[in-house]
Image (tube, coloured by chain):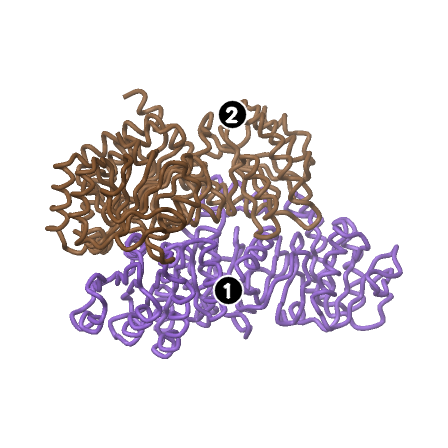
Chain colours: A purple, B brown
Amino acid sequence: MLQSFFEPKSIAIIGASKKPGKIGYEILKNIIEGGYVGKIFPVNPKENEILSLRCYHNIKEIKDHVDLAIIAIPATAIPSVLEDCGVKGIKNVIIISAGFSEVGNIELENRVKKIAQRHGIRIVGPNCAGIINTWYNLFASFEVRCKRGGISLISQSGAFGGAFITRANYENVGISKFVSYGNAIDINESHLIRYMADDKTTKVIGIYLESTKDGREFISAAKLASKKKPVVVLKAGRTMSGKRATVSHTGSLAGDDKIYDAAFRQAGVIRVFDFDDFIDTLYILETGMLPSNDNIFIVTNSGGPGVLAVDECEYIGLKVPESSYELKEKLSFLPPICSIKNPIDLVADANYSRYYDTLKVLAESNEVGGVIVICVPPIFIDPMDIAKAIVDVKAIFDEKKKPMIACFMSGDVVAESIKFLKENKIPVFQTPERAARAMQKLVLRKKIIERLQSS
Amino acid sequence: MLQSFFEPKSIAIIGASKKPGKIGYEILKNIIEGGYVGKIFPVNPKENEILSLRCYHNIKEIKDHVDLAIIAIPATAIPSVLEDCGVKGIKNVIIISAGFSEVGNIELENRVKKIAQRHGIRIVGPNCAGIINTWYNLFASFEVRCKRGGISLISQSGAFGGAFITRANYENVGISKFVSYGNAIDINESHLIRYMADDKTTKVIGIYLESTKDGREFISAAKLASKKKPVVVLKAGRTMSGKRATVSHTGSLAGDDKIYDAAFRQAGVIRVFDFDDFIDTLYILETGMLPSNDNIFIVTNSGGPGVLAVDECEYIGLKVPESSYELKEKLSFLPPICSIKNPIDLVADANYSRYYDTLKVLAESNEVGGVIVICVPPIFIDPMDIAKAIVDVKAIFDEKKKPMIACFMSGDVVAESIKFLKENKIPVFQTPERAARAMQKLVLRKKIIERLQSS
């Protein structure tokens, strides 16, 4: 049902503009430069041509069928334009414009809603940032463009979405789809979750949520989706002051946080509380990795960061058991200065082969559910050697269906290694704690799958 | 007493080497290239010259007085060399070499200890990464060099210190002093805390701790220091598995975490639990800013991130009160679409003057204790304009002794603005939650000062 929003064959941009910086200019430019292959119809009564495309004075002038209309004109002018869309037979509309219920203009919002219903128009928005589908080269948004990947973001807040996309670019994380749904006068988070659940290029669904009007439907949609792929929610308005803030923002009251918390749990949703954790969680879950059991092993070349990783793992509920006698036997090739208890401390002079050989033993051991591998490069070891050992041993981890998460600390010194690891599909974090929290999400996801499958 | 460690007039490097990658080469190179102005005496029986300096075959060959000796030779060779140091009258020694109690070699460690005591030699280490004093151009460590600043780091783990320094470089954060004290057979964390407490270029003290042998002395030293400047501790080994890991690392048992927690509280130490939070906390406390009261106000141009900031503030115990009637009156110049409740949402088209005017009102209001100012730049606003407004209004915040913390989200899009803000001494974070946690540390520090002064 939502396919024409994400894969439209033709788009009209109502309010297209010649002025850089104007929303109606930036969206049109994004659509053209993003490589969209369908027909594009700029609409503006004052222009005959924008960005080398014929500009229509109104929607009725367009002879072709229009699959999707994007409206970026002042709110008060929208009802009559929407009527025209209805008459023309346009069934899918994104209203970017603000100035509705979020500023108290409920009457105007209701008028728009009724016109849409009368004509059978489906609406995303108003007060939203648009839609992106990287796999269809569709950048129907004024946000910066992003690279392809498996994360789909459903965001009640447009600015949050923008901040997320630029951060994803910064961290070289890819996006599948992005929807900012704003005031949700028609299409809401639950519709979008259902759509993403069946979308093939969406590997993980992220939701920035301030409120939902239909909790039952949200649980139902989220539970359905969770059975197929991970669903991660960052819920804003969890405190009293936060609730007050949501009213000023999207005009919605956030409601009791405990009820949301229970709903998320019931639906198998993974809840996070922090922007960093949100993006880290989506990043790790996109890999599709699952631990083979709950026992996490830490491999490190530096004691302190190893202890921090162990601490954080245990604090957040992961098991960091001491190596069994059998495992210690298998690791007995390590120099006596190394600790083989867990964390397995390869000490500062650990090179390619010490890392590779140790990781291979862990990948092949049944008592190991997942591995966090830490590197704080000493001056006399090239961190790229350690990165190569990790990349080379990955096939064994994949074969044994066991996650390996890297933590390369040291800023610029390891920048090249981090790039190399990411290119080779090794998830990598810059602190032991963030690596541990990422591993926890994999364990959590595994438990959710088991629970949902048995229910 | 420790001055010769941090401001030595002459240094001998025992175990100096010609081979890049060797500890004895890297330390010597760091000292020379770091711009150390005192005398440098490489010592190695096999070399006559290293890095264009005369190399002595043993310590006794050196005719001049040696203020500080740095030893980087195999552990077993250390007792006889230390004897020579004692005979030569060297009073300060850093033993870099590992291979002592941390690998069970307690007997060797005790021998070294006794030799030092007999000659009145003070020792940092063994099993450590050395000392840095950026204000004296002293880089007596194999860690990468760092820029000058106000953060002094005392680290039981050398690798942790290395990871911290490279991360600080990456984030453009400056260091005053760095000591990795390793096995602490003589000089321990408490001695170092007392030294840093009186050190003029140290604005804030950070400690990575796995264990302390004398809790009473630690509390006493930390309390003394806390009265003068903030003391922040990242204590590893807080969980059962973490404790086990510390034994393998520095050979010390971490002990009961609750006792540490109580000791930290008693001493006025700010405890953190995460590498990111550790560096963020040191960074914000180095500014010396203190809130004038507990009421935090959020200024934003984007609703979602504003709500996240409010949520995190309240969750961690900050007050985010609704603006008073008087304050609302003073903000009535804002367009009606803006929310003036707190968060104060200037909405997406907020430019230089809207930010400046709003921030000025908050700086001058008695009901405002501190401000977090958020920017998620929309396409049609140059984030540098907003950064300039923040920089221009800073003088009023300084005059009113009120902290302002910036949160510029959006990765590369705001990289230039973040640089500009940092150059102008505006602390800036990339997520609302990290900005909120930084503000909390200022509130906490203020309460600690009040409590310590009244006790």
- Residue A184, located in which quarter of the rendered image? bottom right
Name which residue lies at 49% across and 46% down: B171
Name which residue lies at 23% across and 39% down: B188
Task: Indicate the chain on which mark 2 is placed.
Answer: B
Rendering coords of residue B111 (x, y %):
11, 46
Name above or below for residue A109 compared with residue A421.
above
Rendering coords of residue A393 (x, y %):
37, 74
Q: CA distance from mark 2 to mark 1?
A: 41 Å
The disc label shown at residue B367, or none: 2
Is residue B271 visible in this depiction of the protein? no
Residue carrying label 1: A205
How many neighbours does mark 2 have within 10 angstroms: few (below 14), some (14-19), or many (20 or more)? some
Residue B234 or residue B318, whichever sits in front = B234
Which quadrant of the rendered structure holds the C terminus of chain B?
Answer: top left
* Left or right for B11, reference A334: right
How many neighbours does mark 1 have within 10 angstroms: few (below 14), some (14-19), or many (20 or more)? many
Rendering coords of residue B179 (x, y %):
32, 41
Kind of element beneath mark 2: loop
Name above or below for residue B215 compared with residue A217.
above
Q: Residue furthest top?
A: B454
Residue A163 or residue A12, whichever sits in front = A163
Task: Indicate the chain on which mark 1 is placed.
Answer: A
Amino acid carrying label 1: it is Ile
Name which residue lies at 52% across and 37% down: B405
